[in-house]
């Protein structure tokens, strides 16, 4: 009986396809018009297709009336693979926002009072590479 149970478990493990959902690892505002996200895995070609209508199914959902106004653009930042810059319709200063991808739990990020503060936080993250 034990052998049958083990064989059944092995069969089920081998026959089911492992699915891992992509998710946002981190998020940071670049300025008041762009947000940068680091994803666990690359976005698909379909998700990056600029011909898809943004009003149909947005990849990323924001709170407080913020919407994507363009497709995510892959950034080449050493040490931060799968980094995408997302253009948005405008962030308010000194506000906490949330962003979600798919059905994953939202991540929060904060804007600061001035664009210089946001830029300084961004430089602190990436160093002189910025």
Image (spheres, rainbow, N blue to C red):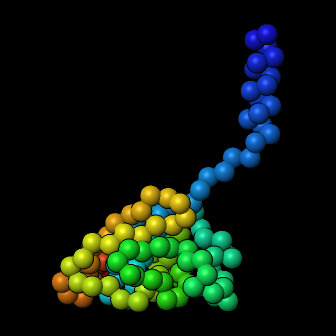
User: Which quadrant of the figure has residue 25?
Assistant: bottom left
> Is 22 situated above or below 114?
above
Which part of the image, by quadrant, shows the C terminus?
bottom left
- Residue drawn at x 75%, y 20% is 6
Does any portion of residue 126 appear in the rendered image? Answer: no
Return the x and y of residue 71 as percentages of the image width and height: 55, 84
Return the x and y of residue 65 as percentages of the image width and height: 38, 81
Q: Is residue 115 left or right of residue 14?
A: left
> Is 43 situated above or below 30?
above
> Is 36 situated above or below 1?
below
User: Which quadrant of the figure has residue 92?
Assistant: bottom left
- Residue drawn at x 35%, y 82% is 30
Which part of the image, by quadrant, shows the N terminus?
top right
- Residue drawn at x 55%, y 74% is 59
Toward the left, the furthest residue is: 113
Count the labels in the image.
0
Return the x and y of residue 119 as percentages of the image width and height: 27, 83
User: Which quadrant of the figure has residue 64?
Assistant: bottom left
- Residue drawn at x 62%, y 52% is 20
Q: Nearer the viewer, residue 80 or 128?
A: 80
Q: Nearer the viewer, residue 96 or 24?
A: 96
Q: Is residue 19 left or right of residue 112?
A: right
Does any portion of residue 32 appear in the rendered image? Answer: yes
Return the x and y of residue 62 as percentages of the image width and height: 42, 74
């Amino acid at each position: 009986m034990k052998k049958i149970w083990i064989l059944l478990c092995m069969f089920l493990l081998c026959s089911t396809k492992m699915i891992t959902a992509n998710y946002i690892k981190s998020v940071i505002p670049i300025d008041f018009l762009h947000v940068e996200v680091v994803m666990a895995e690359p976005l698909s070609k379909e998700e990056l297709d600029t011909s898809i209508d943004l009003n149909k199914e947005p990849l990323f959902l924001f709170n407080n009336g913020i919407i994507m106004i363009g497709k995510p653009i892959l950034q080449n930042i050493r040490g931060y693979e799968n980094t995408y810059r997302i253009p948005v319709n405008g962030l308010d200063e000194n506000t906490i926002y949330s962003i979600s991808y798919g059905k994953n739990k939202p991540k929060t990020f904060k804007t600061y009072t001035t664009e210089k503060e946001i830029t300084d936080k961004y430089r602190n993250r990436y160093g002189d590479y910025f």
